[in-house]
Amino acid sequence: KAGVTQTPRYLIKTRGQQVTLSCSPISGHRSVSWYQQTPGQGLQFLFEYFSETQRNKGNFPGRFSGRQFSNSRSEMNVSTLELGDSALYLCASSTQSTGFEQYFGPGTRLTVT
Amino acid sequence: GIQVEQSPPDLILQEGANSTLRCNFSDSVNNLQWFHQNPWGQLINLFYIPSGTKQNGRLSATTVATERYSLLYISSSQTTDSGVYFCAVPYNQGGKLIFGQGTELSVKP
């Protein structure tokens, strides 16, 4: 079975721009979660989607949004980029929403200049 | 919310040595995961271990849920074991994992 895939793997954007990241879960997985990793804050939960519905949301500003499609693929969008948004963005998939083993993709490394 | 603490924060070993990494959590949990973050940033699943002991090659893990801790054992360490090890527990609903700050392991040849 193919693992979780994320595109693009690397991205350089300018302050004020917006960006869309994509995540394709493992086949059969219906839950997709997004995390931000920075040296200062560690790994922080952004949000989780299950069957196209956002089930949980972390403590991030409204500039961070996401969605999930009927095939379980998910996208996250960051508008009006700030320098502090530079981070590794990881997505994870799971068969169910809560309490099940999560599998992570390779991540998208975003640099905001 | 739940707190997850890992120790030690850093560990330097000579190849062939054994090590124990610890993960403490502040509230009861119904599962726990251990990950190894490779140099490219991907989190590799090591164990999904709500309780008890599991082994996979040179690695094993034990979770004592009643005492709110988990241990990851690495035996006969190799340079490829280097990287950051994270434990994570679920919190609330909806797929949220709370991660510890990680243990950075460096194995020297």
Image: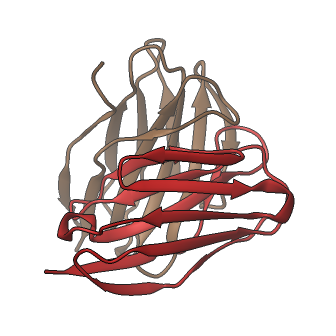
Chain colours: A brown, B red
Vertical relation: A51 (above or below) B20: above
Give the residue drawn at x 60%, y 65%.
Answer: B71
Asked whether residue A62 appears in the rendered view, the answer is no
Give left or right: position of A113 versus B6: left
Quick one: which residue is furthest to the left in this view? B109
For the C terminus of chain A, the quadrant is bottom left
Give the image location of residue B46, x and y in percent: 44, 48
Front residue (pair B27, A52): B27
Q: Is residue A93 left or right of residue B39?
A: right
The residue closer to the viewer here, A112 or B12, is: B12
Question: Is the N terminus of chain A in the top left, top right, bottom left or bottom right quadrant?
Answer: top left
Q: In the shown orientation, is residue A71 left or right of residue B49?
A: left
The relative height of residue A89 versus residue A97 in the rendered view (above or below) is below
Residue at 36 percent of width and 55 percent of height:
B58
In this rendering, the count of numbered labels is: 0
Which x, y percent locates residue B75?
38, 65
Q: Residue at x 43, y 66 (%)?
A: B85
Splitting the image into 4 quarters, where does residue B4 fall? Answer: bottom right
Question: Which residue does the image show at 56% across and 36% down from the upper left?
Answer: A101
Q: Residue A72, position in %: x, y? A: 46, 19
Q: Position of residue B78 (x, y in %)?
A: 22, 67
**Would you say residue B104 is visible in this rendering?**
yes
Residue situated in front as seen by the camera: B2 or B16: B16
Q: Quick check: A21 left or right of A57?
A: left
